[in-house]
Image (spheres, helix red, strand yellow):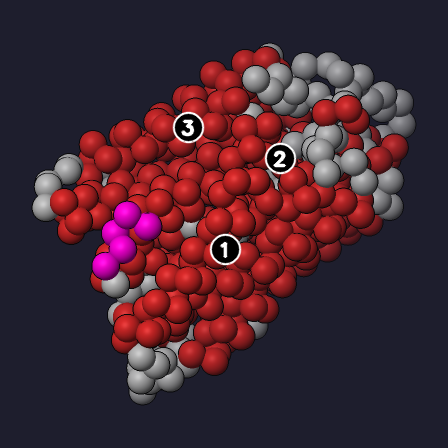
Amino acid sequence: METTTLAEVPMEERKSWIDVAMIQAGIMICVPSLMLGGMLVEAMSFKNAIISGMIGYVIVAVLFCLMGVIGSDIGRPTCVTAIAGFGRKGTRYIISTLIFISMIGWFAVQTSVCGNAFSSLIKSSAGEDFPPQASMAIWGLIMLVTAVYGINALDWLNRISVPALFVITIAGTVLAVNKYGTGNLFNDPDKPGMTIVGGIVLTVSFMAAGCLAASDITRFQRTRRDTVLSSVLGVSPAGILMVVLGAVMTRVAQQYDLTQVFVMVGLPILGMIVLIAATWTTNTTNAYSGGINAVLMLRLADDRRWLATMVSGVLGTVCALLGLADHFEAFLYILGDLLLPTMGVILADYWILGRGKPENFHMPQGFNWLGIVSWLAGYAVIRLIPQGIPFAQGILAAGLLYIILTKLIGRPQDKPGYVDAELTDRL
């Protein structure tokens, strides 16, 4: 059972970049990722959908690296790395709460998709009615168990599941193409409902919570090199593959959901295996990050993370039963709008003001209003200026304003007489 939560992860507990890359890839491989490919290809040409997904996931990988290296440098999760820019109370009451809600939402979406698909598979393969609500409850609790045990359980799960999922998802797409042909593959919509820029925005918004929470996993990396390798090779290839497969299956089989495609080609058991494994590798991380943020929110001891994780997963399962997944696309945009500008503050504080040096990282008490005001300004830019690339403009606006304000007013840790609290103090 993992017991290191807000404290620095000791070097002897850290892992190889391959182990962390498997966890990152496992986050990418899921039914909603296939859904993203389907959403893109239904709104634009096949070529533009793939371009949007590829560019989007390259940007996601860059954000993962920038956020993740901070975590590996100081060995702490995102909710701790955010304290420098938002203050301890600002992070506890605002940033951690926001991430916690996001992770519960993602857990709900994944559990709902898994529950509904599992019930459909039972119906189509065995002819038996299995209530989706019961399926959601069962699988939500099963997936929660891995998250409760922590990083070692995530490592074990993804080491087994990810290579198998790569092979099976590609094989399923090939079967779909063989059965239905490629006649509809380039049958593009007459009037595209989304531009390439819009597709990029949707893709990055899709992974906004994951980018922000990158340090929750990369704190277990030994070096910056390991963090970059695991982030680039774990995130981009798996994410782009899911977009491509989701787009191809939506066009040729009129179905983005690979599990249903397996049913359509006469292999329901294989579809069920993919459904469970793909959802499990992603959803367990959602509950895991939710639990870490709950520890800070509720001022729990490090060794109570398991309990906070369990509560997070149960809340996510309840949200699934209430139908959160019905508002999936709107949820993605709202999530990205709220989360992305916080990265502008965190990145500016560490990489520019702190010059990327761990020894310059501090954790001021109270609220750092400079960071909070900058974050809100970045959010306003995203909402009020839809032209261009809103998420990039929001991140840059938040970061630049934070730098300007700190130069004019000064951060709490820059004031004369400031003494940083011991990093081992309970937050």
Q: For the magenta stretch, what is the residue range?
A: 266-270
Mark 2 vs mark 1: which is more N-terminal?
1
x%, y% of residue 102? 46, 40
Label 1, residues with CA under 10 Å away: few <14, some 14-19, many ≥20: some
Amino acid under disc 2: Asp
The C terminus, quarter of image = top right
Image quadrant assignment for residue 55: bottom right
**Who's the residue at 52% across and 22% down the image?**
149
Q: Which mark is residue 144?
A: 3
Q: Is residue 189 above or below residue 155?
A: below
x%, y% of residue 10? 76, 23
**In front here: 285 or 194?**
285
Task: Return the residue at label 2.
Answer: 216
> In what element is the residue under mark 2?
helix
Label 3, residues with CA under 10 Å away: few <14, some 14-19, many ≥20: many
Q: How far is mark 3 from mark 2, CA to CA?
A: 17 Å
Q: Is residue 353 above or below residue 244?
A: above
Q: How far is mark 3 from mark 1, CA to CA?
A: 23 Å
Task: Return the residue at label 1.
Answer: 166
**Who's the residue at 46% across and 74% down the image?**
49
Tell me, yes or no, whether the two marked residues, 2 and 1, touch with CB atoms within 8 Å.
no
Q: Is residue 285 above or below residue 348?
A: above
Tell me, yes or no, whether the two marked residues, 3 and 1, touch with CB atoms within 8 Å.
no
Amino acid under disc 3: Leu
Label 2, residues with CA under 10 Å away: few <14, some 14-19, many ≥20: many
Q: Main secondary structure of the magenta part?
A: helix
Please state which of the two labelled residues, at mark 3 or mark 2, is closer to the viewer.
Answer: 3
x%, y% of residue 291? 51, 26
Please state which of the two labelled residues, at mark 2 or mark 1, is closer to the viewer.
Answer: 1
x%, y% of residue 244? 46, 68
The N terminus, quarter of image = top right
From where the camera sits, is residue 36 visible?
A: no
